[in-house]
Image (cartoon, rainbow, N blue to C red):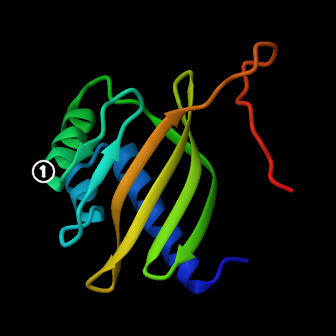
Amino acid sequence: MPTPLEDAVLAANRAFYNAFLERDPHAMEQIWAVEHPASCIHPGWAPLLGRENVMASWRAILGSPEAPRVEVTDPKVVVLGGAGLVTCVEHITDATIAATNVFVQESGEWRLVHHHGSPMPMTRSSRRPVSSRMN
């Protein structure tokens, strides 16, 4: 069972994906940090540094009629001091993306400071993501 702190980070992660799903640039701006440096690596993109660049990318993505629909599965959270790290799997059209979202506290709220999405390898026979397990 997640702790209350982990639940709060997972709620912030859901807010991020809700803004993405609803194509809501205002909600997306609300979830990203203002006081801390922001960075983002969209699948296939070069790293974006700074809130202005990150938010410009999200406005472009969310404002596009071809904006992808995302379904998120398997969120896992770790809280390390003042940071919350969530890994999850994004299902976007035919792609499966491994994502990492890093949150920090600002004014008592968890805010996103980094998002990184990377395509997951697929097996040839099943066209399903290859997963690795740590035992």
Q: Nearer the viewer, residue 131 or 13?
A: 131
Vertical side of 118 occupied by 134: above or below: below
Mark 1 belongs to which amino acid? Glu
- Residue 22, visible in the rendered structure: no
- Residue 129, visible in the rendered structure: yes
Picture coordinates of residue 132 (x, y %)?
A: 77, 42
Q: Secondary structure at mark 1?
A: helix
Picture coordinates of residue 22 (x, y %)?
A: 35, 46
Q: Tag 1: Cα neighbours inside 10 Å, few (<14), some, or many (≥20)?
A: few
Q: How many marks?
A: 1
**Residue in view at x 18 percent, y 55 percent:** 51
**Residue in view at x 55 percent, y 75 percent:** 79
Q: Pointer 1: what residue?
A: 52
**Residue in view at x 33 percent, y 30 percent:** 45
Picture coordinates of residue 39 (x, y %)?
A: 29, 52
Q: Residue furthest top?
A: 124
Residue 53 falls left or right of residue 91: left
The image quarter in which residue 42 lies: top left
Vertical side of 79 occupied by 47: above or below: above
**Residue in view at x 76 percent, y 13 percent:** 124
Q: Residue furthest left?
A: 52
Picture coordinates of residue 129 (x, y %)?
A: 70, 30
The image quarter in which residue 26 lies: bottom left
> Which quarter of the image is occupied by the C terminus?
bottom right
Q: Residue furthest right?
A: 135
Residue 82 falls left or right of residue 3: left
> Which quarter of the image is occupied by the N terminus?
bottom right
